[in-house]
Image (cartoon, rainbow, N blue to C red):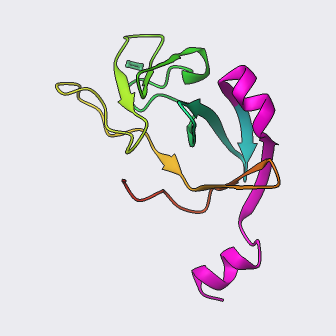
Amino acid sequence: MDEDAAASAGVGWTPVCNLDRLRADTIIRVNVASLDLLVIWNDGNVVACDRACPHEQADLALGEVRAGRLFCPRHAASFDLRDGAIDRGWPSPPLRLYPIRITGGQICVDAREQQAPR
Ligand code: FES
């Protein structure tokens, strides 16, 4: 089955939370395919990403979302929620993002592969 056929068949898409709950809470911890992820409300957009900071593995669930960026609670570096890029000058790979889709108010994440940068 190719990727488009798998997606349309719902293969790989895991329901993780309700959109109304995410709007209220901003950051929600989820587990998809044994991966610890976050689902984030970012100014009207939903983003799914790794829970562990790619710099030194801090828990980004304790971070803060401001102006389209997720701020790490440990060293305060921030990640662009469009593509996962970290602030310039930090020796770290980008934050890994995952594809999401919303069906009937339910947010689903596909943790099989990383989302292409926007
Ligand atoms: S652990 Fe997140 S910026 Fe260092």
**Residue shown at 48%/57% (left/top)?**
114
Specify the quadrant of the image occupied by residue 80. top left
Quarter of the figure with the N terminus: bottom right
Which residue is more in the foreground, 44 or 17? 44
User: Magenta residues?
Assistant: 1-28
Specify the quadrant of the image occupied by residue 75. top left
**Residue shown at 67%/74% (left/top)?**
7
Q: As drawn, which residue projects farthest toward the left?
A: 89
Q: Where residue 101 appears, x then y in whole percent?
A: 66, 56
Q: Where residue 56 appears, x then y in whole percent?
A: 41, 23
**Residue shown at 40%/42% (left/top)?**
82
Which residue is more in the foreground, 19 or 91? 19
Specify the quadrant of the image occupied by residue 94. top left
Which residue is more in the foreground, 12 or 104? 104
Q: Where residue 83 appears, x then y in whole percent?
A: 37, 45
Q: Where residue 2 appears, x then y in whole percent?
A: 60, 87
Give above or below for 110 relative to 91.
Answer: below
Give above or below for 27 relative to 112.
Answer: above
Q: Is 92 positioned to the left or the right of 41 in the image?
A: left
Tally the numbered discs.
Answer: 0
Q: Is 77 positioned to the left or the right of 48 in the image?
A: left
Task: Report the image quarter containing ligand 1.
Answer: top left
Q: Is 73 positioned to the left or the right of 88 in the image?
A: right
Give above or below for 99 relative to 18.
Answer: below
**Residue shown at 37%/12% (left/top)?**
76
Tell me if residue 58 is in the magenta stretch.
no
Tell me if residue 16 is in the magenta stretch.
yes
